[in-house]
Image: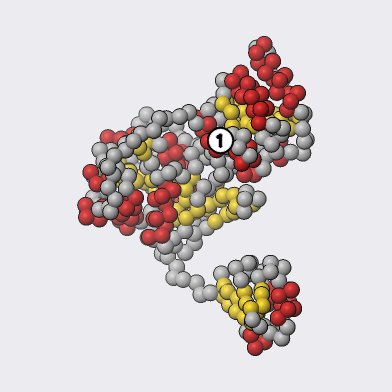
Amino acid sequence: MGKLIVHQDKVTDIAAMVALCPFKALEDNNGKLEINAGCKLCKLCVKKGQPGAMEFVEEEAGPQVDKSLWKGITVYVDHVEGDIHPVTLELLGKARELADKIGHPVQALFLGSGIGDKAHELLHYGVDKVYVVDTPELMDFKIESYTAAFEAYINKVKPSAILVGATSVGRQLAPRIAARFKTGLTADCTILDMHDNTDLVQIRPAFGGNIMAEILTTNTRPQLATVRYKVMNAPERSEEAKGEVVPLEVPADKLKARMEVLGIIKKEKKKTIESAEVLVVAGRGLKKPEDIAMVRQLAEALGGDVACTRPLVETGWMEAAHQIGLSGRTVRPKLIITCGVSGAIQFVAGMNNSEQVVAINSDPEAPIFKVANYALVGDIYEIIPQLIEKIKQGGALA
């Protein structure tokens, strides 16, 4: 990276310089040429501007981290009262894949109280070591205490990379850890890979899903990434438990928190679209909110649930809990049928790991057909009723 410097004494025509910038990042401020937040560092003003008026200065690189001191891929064990969230198992599978590429071990960090017995279950999923901080101070989730325990673990074990589930807990912990170690964090990764030099390749949609960004943390350790549930594949549980459980002691005074949990009120568990094996998705192809009943009828005929795209949530036709995509939920059903969905990358990122994708759209060039196993080109108002009728009759959908 670098920065632009304005040499005011070399600026002969401010208006010409302002007009030169395609991003409107140069402006006249009381007779002085200044750079605003719109600058993209394209350096056009340096190349095409008045001689000597603008200068690009490369910033000196900070000290390089000794990557050989950091070893292992760690997965944070997300749980509620010892019940392990399935995203943890998915991340263990990915961690094993990444670790094998560079010959590193796979570690798991389990924080809580009374969790010792649950830690052994993780040994059936390819973990080399499960580090357990089991103490009454971690009975309830308090961000200060959990961050302190996490920090103590990193200082002791020095993992090269850390994978955290993008849950309500993980999204609180990961940025705090990144801040404490002044390292990078990439949220909601959809693809992870590993370079031979132990740099974690973190890929996620960016700029509203219009591009896929490849992010590397080259100068600091540990590397942190969060991943949503249902994005990665969970490994099969092995019959034999391999690896070991390692108790980790953290002084109680380091786990003190300024907040106190007075009580926990458990809310009623609701069925979510993430757990559905069959989903029928309503898109902008629907003409009015009443037409969702037609989509719901198809879903019920298949024993599935109804989901939607972001525009239907924004118009108030459906609740946010039913939205699939980058700003919604990530799903992996056995069957997903999209009805009038164009297939923007923001949506596809939330469902492209589905086993079977059936897309219905009147536009033969719709992007959704690129990820569909079966493409039905036509009017959803004609096709959906026919599908419902065939299902009721017990006939084939083809």
Is residue 68 visible in the rendered structure shown here? no
287 up-or-down from 95: above or below: above
Is residue 40 visible in the rendered structure shown here? yes
Q: Residue at x 48, y 39 (%)?
A: 229
For the residue pair 342 and 72, the one nearer the viewer reads as: 342
**For the view shown, which residue lies furthest in the bottom direction?**
9
Q: Residue at x 56, y 49 (%)?
A: 204
Q: Give coordinates of residue 255: x percent, y percent.
A: 26, 52
Q: Give coordinates of residue 330: x percent, y percent.
A: 54, 38
122 up-or-down from 158: above or below: above
Q: How many numbered tags mark residues here?
A: 1
For the residue pair 266 and 109, the one nearer the viewer reads as: 266
Q: Give coordinates of residue 122: x percent, y percent.
A: 35, 37
Q: Quadrant of residue 350?
A: top right
Residue topped by disc 1: 319
Q: Residue at x 39, y 55 (%)?
A: 177
Q: Secondary structure at mark 1?
A: loop
60 up-or-down from 386: above or below: below
The quadrant of the rendering that contains the C terminus is top right
Q: Quadrant of residue 42?
A: bottom right
For residue 261, side relative to residue 189 (left or right): left
For residue 378, side relative to residue 293 (left or right): right
> Dot 1 surroundings within 10 Å: few (below 14), some, or many (20 or more)?
some
For residue 178, side relative to residue 156 (left or right): right
The quadrant of the rendering that contains the N terminus is bottom right
